Image (spheres, grey):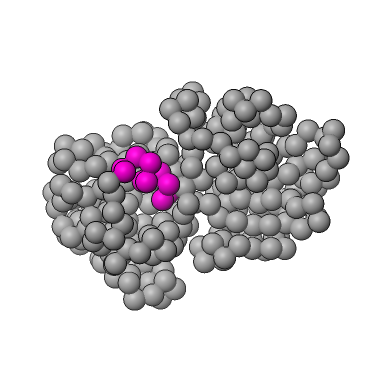
Amino acid sequence: MSENRIPLAGVIGSPIAHSKSPQLHGHWLKTYGLRGHYIPMDVSTDNLGQVLDALPKMGFVGVNITVPHKEKVMEFADLVTDRATLIGAANTLTFQKDGKLRADNTDGYGFFENLRQNAPNWNVKAGPAAVLGAGGAARAVIASLLDAGVPHILLSNRTRVRAEALQSEFGKRIEVVEWVQAGNMLEEATTVVNTTSLGMLGKPPLRVPLDGLRKDAVVTDLVYAPLKTHLLAEAEKMGCTTVDGLGMLLHQAVPAFERWFGVRPEVDSATRAAALR
């Protein structure tokens, strides 16, 4: 891209109006005094390939990808990172100077950094992790936990066959637990993660019994609307360390912003406030 072109980035999904990413990247562009814009784009699956083809010609340096395109977008990439391959989905695309499209997944990184920042005493190796859900977010979380050395993952999903698919893919450190027994797996877990949309505004509640939660457990919910979900409120009452899901969104954006705009942004209280505006 010529020096006088203003770098553009954005987020592609459908729907997209709810995304906090434009506020977040806009805040960083302003904070670091950088030229650039970050735009939300509602794109249907049918038009995805055409849009990705056109963006670099318009001055785009990269885009984030969200629901429902994270898996589909892999088909259009020239280069796919090991992380994205392992997770089977991409959330960050970079249009490289040589014209190639690079696909990466920073969701696992965002999940891990959020826990590191907001639960500084968290030790991933202290005991098993209990993971609720077996969708795209669960894949990123599982890959991240295994990479960090978790000894064992107890995985439960409403549709058992999806959990079993992840077990056969990620290997013997994963044990599938029936959804009706999900409350029991909390008794031995030192890390508890909800990757489902249960408990989100407008979605059904998470009905897993929580009385088995250990006091020394670190509990996190990827849902961030509301910020304090029923799971986090109950865990807090029981003395657990709790971490809300907003930090994962903030941290997963860091590597993308650095790649596109050349500055590594910091996730601080002003960043959180900007995302919550």
Above or below: residue 229 compared with residue 98: above
Above or below: residue 228 compared with residue 67: above
**Closest to the observer, 154 or 263:** 263
User: Quadrant location of residue 77?
Assistant: bottom right
Q: Is residue 97 visible?
A: yes
Question: Residue at (23%, 55%) from the top-left corner?
Answer: 190
Q: Is residue 222 magenta?
A: no
**Closest to the observer, 272 or 222:** 272
Q: Is residue 155 visible?
A: no
Q: Which residues are magenta?
A: 111-120
User: Quadrant location of residue 205?
Assistant: top left
Question: Residue at (16%, 57%) from the top-left corner?
Answer: 187
x and y, in percent, of residue 58 in the image: 81, 40
Question: Residue at (53%, 52%) from the top-left corner?
Answer: 106
x and y, in percent, of residue 71 in the image: 58, 59
In the rendered picture of this protein, how many numbered marks are placed on residues? 0
128 lies left or right of 114:
left
x and y, in percent, of residue 64 in the image: 61, 45
x and y, in percent, of residue 136 in the image: 47, 57
Main SS class of the magenta portion in the image: helix
Question: Residue at (38%, 51%) from the top-left corner?
Answer: 195
164 lies left or right of 109:
left
User: Quadrant location of residue 130?
Assistant: bottom left
Quadrant in which the N terminus appears: top right
148 lies left or right of 4:
left
Above or below: residue 40 compared with residue 214: above
